[in-house]
Amino acid sequence: MRTPEIGTSHTLEYTVRPEDAATFDGEMIHPVYSTPSVVRTMERAARLALLPYLEEGEVGAGHEVHVIHRAPAPIGAHVRVTATITAHAPRRLTCTTVTNHGDRVIATGTVVQGIVAAADFRSRYEAAQDAPGPAPGAGAGHRDDPALR
């Protein structure tokens, strides 16, 4: 990974869709931007912040997410997610995120991406397809994974 500049930001504009609503077992619980959907757009904005720094043959993989979902945004709302690079290590990039609906902050958080060789990630993915998952807290992507050190 090329050295990213701390403070670099990427902003993503997004319109909340019905499939982004809080839904469980096929039933819409609330017609608002759900927390999992907020996390998905946080991760997307952080990925877009990372892309200019990846070297040939590298990929970013979600590693850690923290979110505080502060307020609702209805279906149809236009939200803005800004991911700002706040830290990096040889195989890791951290972004803070702020999600706004108009002038109101509806979510804040942190997204950490691991940087791995695409071939290694692909082989781990293929191995996972044929085997039961690792014990909780173990395996690819875990904070103790040597590939992310």
Image: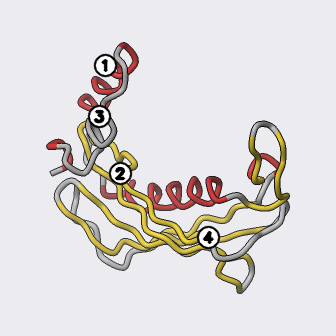
The amino acid at mark 4 is His
Would you name the residue on which mark 4 appears?
69
Amino acid type at circle 1 is Ala
The Cα–Cα distance between marks 2 and 4, rounded to whole angstroms, is 19 Å
Give how far apart the Cα atoms at labels 3 and 2 are.
Answer: 15 Å
The nearer-to-camera label among 1 and 3 is: 1
**Residue picked out by circle 2:** 63
* Residue assigned mark 1: 127
Residue 89 occupies quadrant: bottom left
Please state the horizontal and vertical placement of residue 20, each as a whole percent of the image.
74, 51
The image shows residue 12 at horizontal and vertical percentages of 60, 64
Label 2: element kind: strand
Task: Classify residue 90 as left or right of residue 45.
Answer: left
Which mark's residue is nearer the viewer, 3 or 2? 2
Q: Residues within 10 Å of mark 4 (few under 14, many from 20)?
A: some
Residue type, label 2: His
Q: CA distance from mark 3 to mark 4?
A: 32 Å
**Mark closer to the chain start, 1 or 3:** 3
